[in-house]
Amino acid sequence: MEETSDFRNWDELIPDALGVIFTNLSLQERVTVIPIVCKSWARAVAGPYCWQEIDIKEWSSRYQPEQLDRMLEMLVARSCGSLRKLCVSGLQNERIFTVIAENACSLQTLRLPRSSMSDSIVEQIAGRLSMISFLDVSYCLKMGAHGLEMIGKNCKLLEGLCRNMHPLDTAGKPLKDDEANAIASTMPKLKHLEMAYHLISTSGVLQILSNCPKLEFLDQRGCWGVTLDNLFLKQKFPKLQVLGPLVLDTHDSDGWEDFSDISDSSEYLAWDFVAGGEGEYYVDDDSDSYEGMWNDEDERLLDELHFRFYEGIEDAGMYWPPSP
């Protein structure tokens, strides 16, 4: 009698189960490796379970806006409305913000640092970001107090906000509390706030502290117009941790791990994105190819894009000054 195996082949797992497993792989492995293994894996990686969290922030700083837009559109489309976390840097095209908003029904964490998102764009899309609990709009120079006000009025679940600025963008400019006023008047549930190198005064910070009673962390490094008495803070806000205004270190962690499930992207290898190549995906001669697996947009993009690995580049982040 032929013995039966206690183990099942991986390609026999249902696509949803495979998709959940593949989320433990890096982004480039899901895009370049998994699709060429076998048909069932290719189908699974094209499904939404693999794309509920998309983090291409480190990768995005190295490529042209049009390349970034095409990549982001493809990945967001694969999420099929189940996107929970999106991290991408340097978006320039107004249309791409609309694409994100149209797929934000489940979005909770949104990081868009160094993007050209203006107040008018925020006003158009803020109503679709109602599920956001953490937002990073650091170094977005086209956004101001009105944009923050629109975010606060529409994102009622917001608990974390990063609004850091680069010291070169604020040096020598007069203090302004308009953004602090917008935060204080519309974001009462904030627990985590970063405003490093901001043109904010002591009165602006006090207004935020008075109107955001749940605040646990405040980054005011480089905010040279702020003077707060440590004894006053300990007595009035005993649970509040304040960083700055003195800059003592680079503070690599944003301290938001307690409130948002942020996966570690430090193991990402650098990978090259070349327009005009041909995608190499698994093809079984005995199969009916991939009919129904990819939508038309995915097929068009995969025909245009070619991905290839190489060892990490040490100066990959050279195009932008490091976050304060």
Image (cartoon, rainbow, N blue to C red):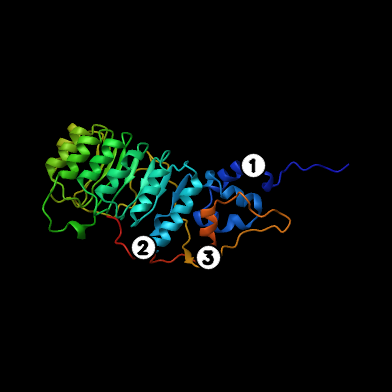
Q: Which mark is residue 103?
A: none
Pointer 2 residue = 317
Residue neighbourhood size for the residue with mark 1, other residues' Cα within 10 Å, grouped as few (<14), some (14–19), many (≥20): few
Q: Nearer the viewer, residue 34 or 239?
A: 34
Q: Which mark is residue 308?
A: 3
Mark yes or no: residue 306 visible.
Answer: no
Looking at the image, tell me whether mark 3 or mark 2 is earlier in sequence order.
3
Residue 251 x, y percent position in the rendering: 30, 52
Disc 2 is placed on an element classified as loop
Measure how far apart labels 3 and 1 are at the Cα level: 28 Å
Residue 136 x, y percent position in the rendering: 32, 47
Residue 274 x, y percent position in the rendering: 48, 67
Measure how far apart labels 1 and 2 are at the Cα level: 39 Å
Specify the quadrant that holds the C terminus: bottom left
Amino acid type indicated by mark 2: Gly
Instruction: Answer left or right for 192 relative to 49.
Output: left
Q: Residue furthest right?
A: 1
Disc 3 versus disc 2: nearer the observer:
3
Pointer 1 residue = 14
Looking at the image, tell me whether mark 1 or mark 2 is earlier in sequence order.
1
Residue neighbourhood size for the residue with mark 2, other residues' Cα within 10 Å, grouped as few (<14), some (14–19), many (≥20): some
Q: Nearer the viewer, residue 242 or 101?
A: 101
Instruction: Answer left or right for 263 relative to 162.
Output: right
On screen, residue 289 above or below 273: above
Residue 209 x, y percent position in the rendering: 19, 36
Amino acid type indicated by mark 3: Arg
